[in-house]
Image: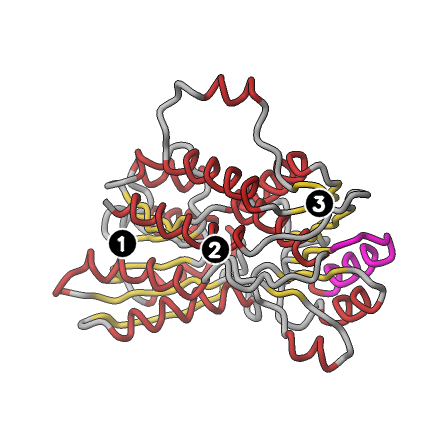
């Protein structure tokens, strides 16, 4: 079954990650409280619960260490206006509590304010954290902050591998760079589902990407575009920016539908834009005629898959992203490599959505 395969692959990547950990100090992750374990002992195991359990057990067994005098960590997320990042924050906070370290969550003024995000990052450097983990808007906008932070003796971490590391090093800085998510793969999976559903007949398709210049959005766009263009009888008629925004994506989809009334499928680089695309399709009187696939598998997308508004969403775990980012911070503080971790993505449709009820 696809979900079980995903679980094994995802766990393999995480196991690879935790087995690389080890430094002097206190043991890192403590097992959940006995009362919590007892309360959940009779619960039916799920892919999510079993994976989280195995991660914790592996961390305990691996000898990952927390500095004896503790750690003060800063996390810079893209936004908390998007449910995806709220769940990343949850993963961060739960893991920091288990590790016994202090974490402060920060965001920039808005999801597309690259200068504002840089200013927030510089303020975090001035606050004197032991480690700062950043989710950048573009490849370049946080480079000056990474350089300044590392020169100040702070471990600076890019968990997603999105920052221009060469530019950091040329400026005399040091960056610990991971690769928790493969955004190109996510776009590829979403587009491949549309191709498979359209079958031999094929049809016209469109892509709603994120903000131009965003590494996540560009990789998802490229993964989808390459997959569509390699498929038989598929014509990509439009690639438009939705800026991760519902209103912008609705307007973009409306324009695409007006120019292409026979549109057969839309891949969207996140679920917020996919739900907006559905609104545009419904307003055009084309419900059931256009396959819409999103990315992130947020709660609203899960419900939309159940009731048929969305055909599918590419799921990965923002909770695990936050969880692993916390471990990355400890590893970087001990000058350890963080480059080998990868959270596998999975396509969720009506066929398997019931098995993903607790996924986050």
Determine crowd level at label 2: few under 14, some 14-19, many 20+ residues with C-alpha closer than 10 A.
some
Q: In which quarter of the image is residue 207?
A: bottom left
Number of labels in the image equals 3
Query: Which residue is under mark 3?
Result: 66
Q: Do the residues labelled 2 and 3 touch (CB within 8 Å)?
A: no
Q: In this view, does 308 lie to the left or right of 80?
A: left
- Residue, x 76% and y 73% (percent of image)? 173
Determine crowd level at label 1: few under 14, some 14-19, many 20+ residues with C-alpha closer than 10 A.
many
Residue 44 position in % (x across, y down):
35, 24
Which secondary structure, mark 1? loop
Q: What stretch is highlighted in magenta?
A: 115-131
Distance between the alpha carbons at the discs numbered 3 and 1: 51 Å
Looking at this view, is 181 or 44 the one in front? 44
Q: Do the residues labelled 3 and 1 touch (CB within 8 Å)?
A: no
Task: Work out which quarter of the rendered image holds the N terminus and state it.
Answer: top left
Label for residue 16? 2
Q: Nearer the viewer, mark 3 or mark 1?
A: 3
Distance between the alpha carbons at the discs numbered 1 and 2: 40 Å
- Residue, x 20% and y 56% (percent of image)? 197
Residue 180 position in % (x across, y down):
51, 57
Picture layout, residue 138 above or below residue 45: below
- Residue, x 21% and y 66% (percent of image)? 203
Distance between the alpha carbons at the discs numbered 2 and 3: 19 Å
Residue 103 position in % (x across, y down):
73, 43
Which secondary structure, mark 2? helix
Query: Which residue is under mark 1?
Result: 290
Q: In this view, does 259 lie to the left or right of 98?
A: left
């Amino acid at each position: 079954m696809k979900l079980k395969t995903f679980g094994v692959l995802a766990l393999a990547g995480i196991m690879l990650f935790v087995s690389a950990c080890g430094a002097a100090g206190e043991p890192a992750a403590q097992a959940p409280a006995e009362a919590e374990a007892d309360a959940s002992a009779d619960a039916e195991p799920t892919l999510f619960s079993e994976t989280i359990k195995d991660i914790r057990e592996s961390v305990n067994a691996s000898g990952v260490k927390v500095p004896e005098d503790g750690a003060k960590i800063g996390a810079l997320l893209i936004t908390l206006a998007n449910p995806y990042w709220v769940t990343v924050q949850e993963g961060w906070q739960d893991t920091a509590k288990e590790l016994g370290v202090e974490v402060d969550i920060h965001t920039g003024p808005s999801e597309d304010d690259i200068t504002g995000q840089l200013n927030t990052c510089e303020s975090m450097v001035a606050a004197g954290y032991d480690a700062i983990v950043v989710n950048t808007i573009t490849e370049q906008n946080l480079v000056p902050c990474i350089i300044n932070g590392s020169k100040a003796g702070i471990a600076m971490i890019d968990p997603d591998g999105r920052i221009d590391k060469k530019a950091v090093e040329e400026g005399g800085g040091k960056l610990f760079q991971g690769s928790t998510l493969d955004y190109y793969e996510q776009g590829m999976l979403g587009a491949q589902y549309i191709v498979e559903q359209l079958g031999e007949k094929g049809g016209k398709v469109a892509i709603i990407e994120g903000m131009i210049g965003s590494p996540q959005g560009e990789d998802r766009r490229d993964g989808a575009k390459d997959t569509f263009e390699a498929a038989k009888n598929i014509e990509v008629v439009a690639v438009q920016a939705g800026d991760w925004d519902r209103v912008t994506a609705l307007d973009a989809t409306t324009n695409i539908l007006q120019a292409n009334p026979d549109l057969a499928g839309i891949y969207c680089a996140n679920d917020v834009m996919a739900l907006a695309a559905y609104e545009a399709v419904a307003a055009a009187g084309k419900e059931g005629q256009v396959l819409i696939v999103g990315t992130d598998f947020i709660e609203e997308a899960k419900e939309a898959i159940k009731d048929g508004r969305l055909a599918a969403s590419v799921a990965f775990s923002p909770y695990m992203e936050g969880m692993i980012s916390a471990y990355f911070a400890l590893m970087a503080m001990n000058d350890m490599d963080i480059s080998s971790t990868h959270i596998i993505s999975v396509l969720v449709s009506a066929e398997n959505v019931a098995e993903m009820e607790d996924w986050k």
